[in-house]
Image (spheres, rainbow, N blue to C red):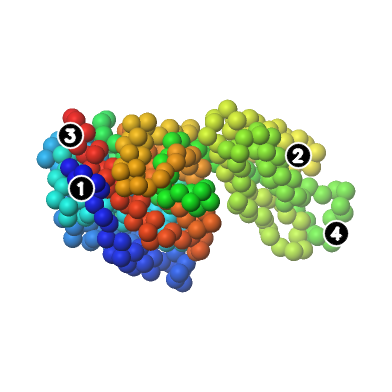
Amino acid sequence: MPSTPPEINSPLLQKRIDELSLITEAEPPVVTRVLFSDSDLRGRQFVRNLCEEAGLAVRVDEAGNMFARWEGSAPDAPAVATGSHIDAIPNAGKFDGVVGVLGALSAIEALQESGFRPMRSIEIVVFTAEEPTRFGIGCLGSRMLAASIPLGKVRGLRDPDGLTFDELRARAGLRGALESVALPKGFYSAFIELHIEQGPLLEQENLPIGIVQAIAGPSAYRVRIKGEGGHAGAVLMPGRHDASLAAAEFALAVEKGALASGSPDTVATTGKWEIFPNAINSVPCDAVLEIDLRDTCLETRERALMLAREASVEIAARRGVTITWDEINADPPADGDPRTIEIAEDVALQIDLASRRMVSRAYHDSLFMARVCPTTMIFIPCFKGYSHRPEEYSDPAHVAQGARVLAGTLARLSHQPL
Ligand code: GLV
Ligand code: MN
Ligand code: MN
């Protein structure tokens, strides 16, 4: 076991992050890599090649989750897992997810070069569809690994073009049973994910490392509003049942419901709108909204939801429209594992990196991995907290420091007694 975590080859890690960012459906520097798109498939191949060059054994499950294994001296013992995702939402940057995948590979390579020999195997997981872009639901791969989504629901998913998950994974050559994806009990001894913070706190507090003690529970709802359309000039104002105005009032009520909780951890966003027929001279007859509601506390999240539901009943009655709700997902929050958190903190301390414990308000595959093994995350600062936009940026020194803390933590977890 190395006494201090080995140094990371930072220029090589940066070069790989840059190269992967050029595999995109958008014009660089914008990154867009939607699940099972050509760029997602090419990105997977890019990562696969690097892992194989590092001597890792790569396998892919039937959902497209990719695993790259550094075999330990106790190959039958539960392995230590790390990793993240490489899919990217439209108009994204190059660090979200990628730092956790390529940073993990750099961590393993640094350990290899230091002469470290793992006892428990160490495995990088590249999760399928952490982002909800294609199917409207996030963390699809890790949900399936943790058996946290009924497979009937997965088979019923449709992308905006009407394509199913089965049709799309077949394009990636995956045609086997999805039943095989769920991890056997005790498969991993721990999971630790390196990620940019996606918030401003570390930067503001001038801290290089955050250790995640809780991940907020996300929920999402699709709300359909049916009103009555008509000619924008001819339908008089008093007789209108304008779906888009009902939607506008409803979105404000969603905001009010979240603010009423009094907790900064209750956050609600009405980020997706479809208005039909979406024409200037037509009274909108239909609106479909998607609401993202999150909290570290289930009770306050439920209360915000209840307030939004009550408001929707009132708005529907007053405006003469119908409002119906579908739940997309409603996931509980997750706690970081105290022991794994302590190890990561101790490794940071060992190399004089100050750290703080923090909450992840974004969701991550760690939310679902926490259901199958002790889990935490290592956060690094990012410029102004920017994420999900092309300006997303993390200083190379911070990326390397995060990967180094990851390397030290993986080494210790790998030698945890059987
Ligand atoms: C993940 O990308 C999230 O929306 O939190
Ligand atoms: Mn993201
Ligand atoms: Mn991410």
Quadrant (top left, top right, bottom left, bottom right) of the N terminus? top left
Q: Position of residue 43 (x, y in %)?
A: 33, 62
Q: Residue at x 55, y 36 (%)?
A: 295
Q: Earlier in the sequence, mark 2 or mark 4?
A: 4
Q: The residue tagged with tag 3: helix, strand or loop?
A: loop
Q: The residue tagged with tag 2: helix, strand or loop?
A: helix
Q: Which mark is nearer the camera, 2 or 4?
A: 2
Q: Which amino acid does the dot numbered 3 rest on?
A: Ala
Q: Mark 3: is the Cβ under 8 angstroms from ligand 3? A: no
374 and 394: which is toward the camera:
394
Whole-angstrom CA distance, mark 3 to mark 4, is 73 Å
Quadrant (top left, top right, bottom left, bottom right) of the C terminus? top left
Whole-angstrom CA distance, mark 1 to mark 4, is 67 Å
Q: Position of residue 201 (x, y in %)?
A: 52, 48
For label 1, the residue is: 69
Give the quarter of the image for residue 369: top left
Q: Residue at x 25, y 58 (%)?
A: 48
On screen, residue 210 above or below 263: below
Give the quarter of the image for residue 378: top left
Task: Count residues near mark 3 (Cα–Cα under 10 Å), then give few for <14, some for 14-19, many for 20+.
Answer: some
Q: The residue tagged with tag 4: helix, strand or loop?
A: loop
349 and 24: which is toward the camera:
349
Task: Count residues near mark 2 (Cα–Cα under 10 Å), then give few for <14, some for 14-19, many for 20+.
Answer: many
For label 4, the residue is: 234
Q: Earlier in the sequence, mark 1 or mark 2?
A: 1
On screen, residue 368 above or below 15: above
| Badge 2 vs badge 4, beta-carbon distance below 8 Å | no
Q: Is residue 268 visible?
A: yes
Q: Which mark is nearer the camera, 2 or 3?
A: 3
Q: Position of residue 12 (x, y in %)?
A: 28, 64
Q: Earlier in the sequence, mark 3 or mark 4?
A: 3
Q: Which amino acid does the dot numbered 1 rest on?
A: Arg
